[in-house]
Image (tube, grey):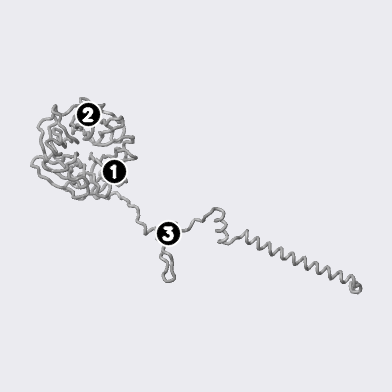
Amino acid sequence: MDPYNSNPKRYSDRILIYILVAILLAILCMVCLGSGILIRRYAFPDVKSTRTALAELFGTITPLVTPSLQLDTPQASPTKSPQPLPTQTQIPPKPTYSPPVWLEPPPGKIVYACFVNGYDQICKMKADGSGIIQLTDEESTNFYPSFDPDGERIVFSSRRDGNFEIYIMDVDGSNVHKLTDNVGNLYAPEISPNGKRIVFTAESGGKQAIWIMKIDGGNARPISSDDIYGIDPTWSPSGDRIAFASIIGGATQLFIVNADGTKLKQVTKGISGIGGRSTWSPDGEWLAFYAGPKGDRDIYMINVDDKELRKLTDGGDNLGPSFSPDGEWIAFTSYRDGNNEVYVMRSDGSNATRLTGELRSDWQPRWGR
């Protein structure tokens, strides 16, 4: 016999216990269910919840597309499809420069002025445009470089000591020596073909005259007691004559004078806008120079005897020509690509090729062996 059935009081107590246990189990299930929801929400949030939480934490969310591109994107409409976002290929690329590829590269090397960090410096490269090297690094102007006949040394003008003086250095930029001392402001030095003398321009009292001195800087003096005024002198290949630009008689023209200051001769006549720098052909028969209005100058050649004139360029603002030692090429500066760069061309004006491509001024090229 079941004792609980035989006792009504015990039976009611048993029913009460069952009810209490059921209530406790129900409460326990509700607690477990609530805990699971909380755990899922905070331990495993969805993406949207995560981005919202990050936005609250950091203040913003970086968009997948840049703001500028979003602003330029047209708004979608019910009747028109949204326009595609601009892509990188639609943005014009930054212009780049590739050095020329030569079948028969020009021989020798070229020294020139390069504008670096606010100052003109001396740079050097092979005549094919490769192997560019900066030779000076002074917080002052360094320009008007040229080679000696063997291409082993470079003479130039520098203001590193406060005055424009003439310096000489090895072709690798070492062994720099100052050759002059407070003679005046000195420019455009060039070593004679025999390597024994230097011709240059000396400025004093607002006038510029053609001077000459020994290779070591000694015996610096005007080439003539008459003070032949002019700029940018250059030796003939034989070393017995000097060409230069001067305002003798009026507008700037090209002149030739013997190295001893005798037999002054005018080469050009009636050509307007002649600049300073010229260059002799290796055979001594021609002078290459530049002339024309500022911003539209061209390179010309003139025969020093019969005055035959040839125009080698047409537009682009070109200046500062320099013959190659073999006479087959001419180096020059040009603005034809929007910045002054060094170019070379054949001596007949063909095959003009850009050598430098830095976002800076490269100018005053002089050719050497």
Residue that carries the numbered disc 3 in the rendered image: 71
Secondary element at tag 2: loop
Q: CA distance from mark 3 to mark 1?
A: 38 Å
Residue that carries the numbered disc 1 in the rendered image: 361
Q: CA distance from mark 2 to mark 1?
A: 30 Å
Instruction: Name which residue type carries label 2.
Output: Ile
**Residue mark closest to the camera, 2 vs 1:** 1
Instruction: Name which residue type carries label 1.
Output: Ser
Q: At 10% from the left edge and 33% from the top edge, which residue is drawn?
A: 264
Percent across and percent down for residue 359 are 32, 46
- Quadrant that contains the C terminus: top left
The residue lying toward the viewer, choosing from 337 and 365, is 337
- Quadrant that contains the N terminus: bottom right
Q: Residues within 10 Å of mark 1 (few under 14, many from 20)?
A: some
Residue that carries the numbered disc 2 in the rendered image: 215
Percent across and percent down for residue 185 are 24, 31
**Residue mark closest to the camera, 3 vs 2:** 3
Q: At 69% from the left edge and 65% from the top edge, which residue is drawn?
A: 33
Q: Are marks 3 and 2 in contact (CB under 8 Å)?
A: no
